[in-house]
Image: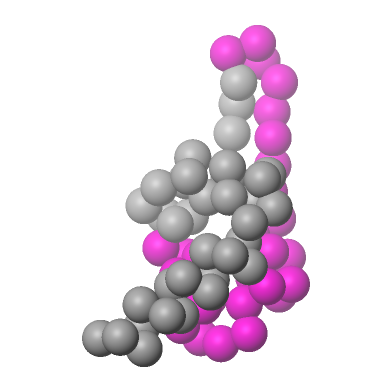
Amino acid sequence: MKYSDGSMLAIDCDGVEDEYAKTIRQRSALDYLVYNVPLEYAELVLCGDVEGYLKIASELDHNE
């Protein structure tokens, strides 16, 4: 991500997956964010709420 002032932010997406995603479905949920809503993914990682997101995503999978 490149900010208007020229500064840049890089997130190691593989590292995030390795740290938080314990199942294929969790990895898929994170991949979906990366490719479809990257700004929301960056915000999730920067705010430190990846575990909370994956918990909600897992609960939604179980309710289908």
- From this viewpoint, which residue is outermost toward the top? 5
Chain part drawn in magenta: 4-32
Colour mapping used in the image: one colour
Quarter of the image where one finds residue 46? top right
Answer left or right for 5 relative to 54.
right
Q: Residue at x 64, y 51 (%)?
A: 45
The residue closer to the viewer here, 3 or 58, is: 58
Answer left or right for 59 relative to 55.
left
Vertical order, 64 against 27 (above or below): below
- Magenta stretch holds residue 30: yes
**Image coords of residue 59 (percent x, y):** 42, 80
The residue closer to the viewer here, 20 or 38, is: 20
**Image coords of residue 13 (percent x, y):** 64, 59
User: Tag count in the figure?
Assistant: 0
**Residue 14 appearing in the image:** no
**Image coords of residue 63 (percent x, y):** 30, 86
Vertical order, 47 against 9 (above or below): below
- Magenta stretch holds residue 31: yes
Q: Residue at x 48, y 45 (%)?
A: 40
The residue closer to the viewer here, 44 or 24, is: 44
Quarter of the image where one finds residue 62? bottom left
**Image coords of residue 27 (percent x, y):** 53, 75
| Quadrant of the rendering where the C terminus is positioned | bottom left
| Quadrant of the rendering where the N terminus is positioned | top right
